[in-house]
Amino acid sequence: MFRIFILLLILIPLLEIWGLAQMGKWIGALPTVLAVIVTSVIGVVLAHRQGLEVYRLTMLQLNRGELPSDTLLDGLLILVGGLLLMAPGFFTDAVGFLLLIPYIRGIVRLLVKRWFEKMAREGRVIRITRRW
């Protein structure tokens, strides 16, 4: 897992630099910089709005005595999407925007839950439960 993280830490910036250079050749330097800034601003605004909705839903579920696990995972995915949108580059922007689409975020949430369940079955994650 650590090796994959290091590999991504090296490959993603290289991919972004290549993408920015290609876009700069295609539409010019100034439009490329403006596009990066505009996508960052739009991403922050969208992530902020959706984050507030998740916060309100979490508070509502907690007040009802419900466990907001899916809502909290949505909030985490929105945070990741917002952070990806603030990073300069078009590939991270694409992934960030995808995470802000509720339908796609639901699919990713399901995949993340399955991944955590698999890790728990294998004993790589400790699950702590509270008995009432």
Image (spheres, rainbow, N blue to C red):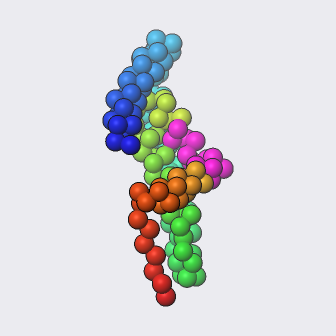
In the picture, the quarter occupied by the N terminus is top left
Magenta segment main secondary structure = helix
Position above or below: 47 against 120: above
Which residue occupies the foreground of this view, 89 or 31?
89
User: Where is residue 40 drawn, in percent x and y?
Assistant: 45, 39
Residue 117 image position (x, y, % from top left): 53, 59
Decide which of 10, 102 is in the foreground and name it. Answer: 10
In this view, the residue farthest toward the bottom is 132
Left or right: 113 with respect to 103?
A: left
Residue name at image x 48 percent, y 84 percent: 131
Q: Is residue 95 above or below residue 78?
A: above
State the residue in front, 69 or 81.
Answer: 69
Q: Looking at the picture, how far across and down is residue 48, in whole percent?
A: 48, 54
Residue displayed at 41% across by 57% down: 124
For residue 34, say whether it is visible. yes
Q: Position of residue 43 (x, y in %)?
A: 49, 43
| Residue at the (46%, 21%) spot, across then down | 19
Chain part drawn in magenta: 95-109
Up the image or down, 25 lies above or below 78; here it is above
Query: Residue at position x 52%, y 38% from top?
Result: 95
Whether the magenta-drawn stretch holds residue 90 is answered as no
